[in-house]
Image (cartoon, rainbow, N blue to C red):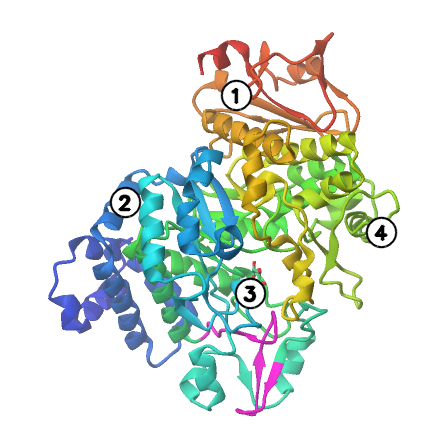
Amino acid sequence: MYEQVSHSLLNQILDELKPEISKRNLLRFYTRLGANFYAIHSLFTHLYGGRDDFLQQMVKLVEVLAMRYIERSDELEMLDIERESNHNWFLDQKWVGMALYAEGFAGDLKGVRNKCGYLSELGINMLHIMPMLKCPAGASDGGYAISDFRDIDERYGDLNDLSELSANLRKRDMLLTLDVVVNHTSDQHDWALRAKQGEQKYQDYYYCFPDRDIPDMFEETLPEVFPETSPGNFIWDEQSQRWFMSVFNAYQWDLNYSNPAVFIEMIDIILFWANRGADVIRLDAVAFLWKKIGTTSQNEREAHLILQLMKDCCQVTAPGVVFIAEAIVTPTEIIKYFGEDAVIAKECEIAYNATFMALLWDSVATKNTKLLTQGIKNLPNKLNGATWLNYIRCHDDIGLGFDDRDIVASGYQPRSHRKFLLDYFTGSYDDSIARGVPFGRNLKTGDGRISGSLASLVGLESALQINDPKMVDDAIKMIILLHSMILSFGGIALLYYGDEIGTLNDDSYLQDENKASDTRWIHRPRIDWERAEQRHHHGTVEHRIFSALQKLIGVRKTIPAFADFNNRELVEVDNEHLFAFIRNHPEHQKEEVLVVANFDASPQHLNLSVLRRRGQLPSMQLRDLVSGVSPAIFKDDLVIPPYSFYWLSDQHTSAIM
Ligand code: GLC
């Protein structure tokens, strides 16, 4: 948009740029800067407009964008151009990701490179390498307490190893996802060390106070993220005689985004990783970016403005890069991270679908889909040009963040239902087959979350222990059923390393005093490659899971209706064990797919004539796209076996596929 104030400011900034920038011919950069400048200027004014050094800060910001642009390789710039003209590229059904720790998966980055073949074999083409930057030993929060934002921990390799890995991925048409931990640093980061030494410049990077007055006011409304291991939200630093805000662990200090210098540092870091080949950047803990007394300091409007500004800046320098919002918040809040006011995504293009994840786990425990259907019915529509990251497990715990109204509408009482789920998954009932462990129990509020690997949570661990083939069967079916959901729902499916071979809980973390109090380590495994070899041997657990997922992923990629164009219609069925939806193809009505899943231990039936009457099902000759066969139908009742699913399409259309 043309606006005179912005335009004259832009001219002024261009006049002040340092010679190493102004002397170069950066045509593309200036075109993009011009296109995005009105938005950048407006957002920067909202956030920092009152400051005397506003102009200097804006010049600094533009210089950072230009310097990182100059540094961007020709190859990455070609990708930018390609993706600018195909800007919905990440909505395609072809993308299937896996999140992994380099160390746990293959020792280090070189090891990961050597295992790219394994990932391709499964059909993975988006790799999320969990944080691998320098963190203090023993106070790392699994890589999320960073002491140097530009250097890889030598245990995992170095920048060259990452370059080689990213080049290798690009050759395979695989995307690289990296984290940028935007909300906090380790208390051992250089900025923190200098703040401790009393340098004002760096104390201004954090929320830091000489006495308890402000911290106490904050504490009145700030919840605790890690109540067991890190109660409270401020930590006293002896050296500087200051209280520092530390919402997560005491050694993770929150950055103060009301200081533009912090924003500029962070965009510089984001672009640094974009230039090292990241196609996708996972912005960690974005709900927490803005702190305000009297609030929970989560999901504040300014947090959204910061993200919009990050996106606009990134679009100037590296427009091919997309953002994932890691915000594990309620459905009504999560939707805002796509960029509420815009027609197309203007904040993060991708967001974790923690709602769907938690709802799926509810169905695993209850064997019905009352809350799942209710929750998805109320999941607000997202913008076009934005997509979900659908997952079952990740490196974090499972939080039971359902909307209380949905719990009530499903016929439960919120507090007791959450307690039931917690008890069920942590094996508190004698007959519970789940082997999870509690995480983040808050004795004050009664809240709690769940840790545990997928296989252990669905009962594979207990089944193998008592050597019960039927239980093993059921657990494997459940693993496949859950994956069938994240692969068909709409969005990028993100698998978690180890789940593809049924990796069980690993309690070796209990031997490490730095990990023992954080149960999330139980599901951050070291892959046993001998076990993984079993995937080639028919009948083994590893083969059954791996080959089924391989098949599902392969089939997903051939189904155009599985691309995410907000083309999902929930089907409300009168059988509480079934979850069903239709994925319609935006252009070819004939290619729509009916997805139906049975979470119960007995076969269930779905009355097709009801769907037809509602116009939700064309006169299909149904055929399952995964197995290629027509399912059992008795007098218009489709029968779905226990813990199973169908991806159903018109027989004639699917025959062509
Ligand atoms: C994110 C990470 C989690 C970490 C937290 C604090 O939620 O996923 O593992 O503990 O941020 O950095």
Going from N to C along the chain, the mark reached first, 2 or 3, is 2
The amino acid type, in three-letter code, at marker 1 is: Glu
Is label 2 or label 4 in front?
4
Depth check, front residue: 402 or 378: 402
Q: Residue at x 59, y 64 (%)?
A: 298
Disc 3 marks which residue?
288
The amino acid type, in three-letter code, at marker 2 is: Leu
Disc 1 marks which residue?
592
Magenta-drawn segment:
235-258
Going from N to C along the chain, the mark reached first, 4 or 1, is 4
Q: Residue at x 39, y 53 (%)?
A: 110
In this rendering, the answer to whether 199 lies above or below 157 is: below
User: Crowding at label 3, few (<14), some or many (≥20) Cα neighbours within 10 Å?
Assistant: many
Disc 2 marks which residue?
79
Q: Is residue 20 magenta?
A: no
Residue 499 visible (yes or no):
yes
